[in-house]
Amino acid sequence: METVTIAPVTFTTGAINEIKRLTNEEGFDASQYLRVGVKGGGCSGMTYVLGFDKKEDKDEIFEIDGITCIINPAHGIYLTGMEIHWEGGLNSRGFTFNNPNASKTCGCGTSFAV
């Protein structure tokens, strides 16, 4: 398994803590990796993908603070420089994405345009 040394995205401390909490839950499938990517759709044209998944042949592997992640290299142009954060408050709970490549974002926080 080859690991890419420079990750295209970063995680805040809050995001790292939440991801590690999820991976330590009972029943977590340790054969899966954290997938970071994009897909078509959403209010602004594209939507972020952040979830646990099996590695595909085309995926690159990188590690951020002990978390092994996978990304389709074709998604890199949309994700390079993005910071992923975890909001744990009562009014706003979930992962948020600060993407310098997005020309427009939507109020839902997971949709963007380039």
Image (cartoon, rainbow, N blue to C red):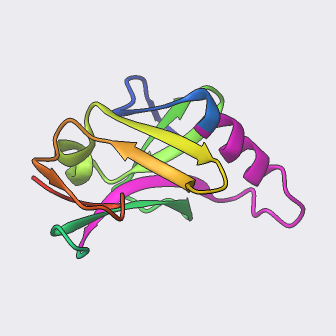
Left or right relative to 90: residue 46: left
Q: Quadrant of residue 51?
A: bottom right
> Which residue is drawn at the image coordinates 69% and 59% (left, top)?
31
Give the magenta range. Answer: 15-40
> Which residue is drawn at the image coordinates 45% and 40% (left, top)?
84
Q: Where residue 92 sits: x, y (%)?
A: 55, 55
Q: Nearer the viewer, residue 72 or 45?
A: 45
Residue 78 is a magenta residue: no
Q: Residue furthest front?
A: 91
Q: Where residue 32 sits: x, y (%)?
A: 64, 59
Placement of 74 over or under 7, stated as above or below: below
Q: Where residue 82 sits: x, y (%)?
A: 32, 36
> Which residue is drawn at the image coordinates 50% and 59% (left, top)?
55
Residue 19 is a magenta residue: yes
Placement of 78 over or under 49, stated as above or below: above
Q: Residue furthest right?
A: 26
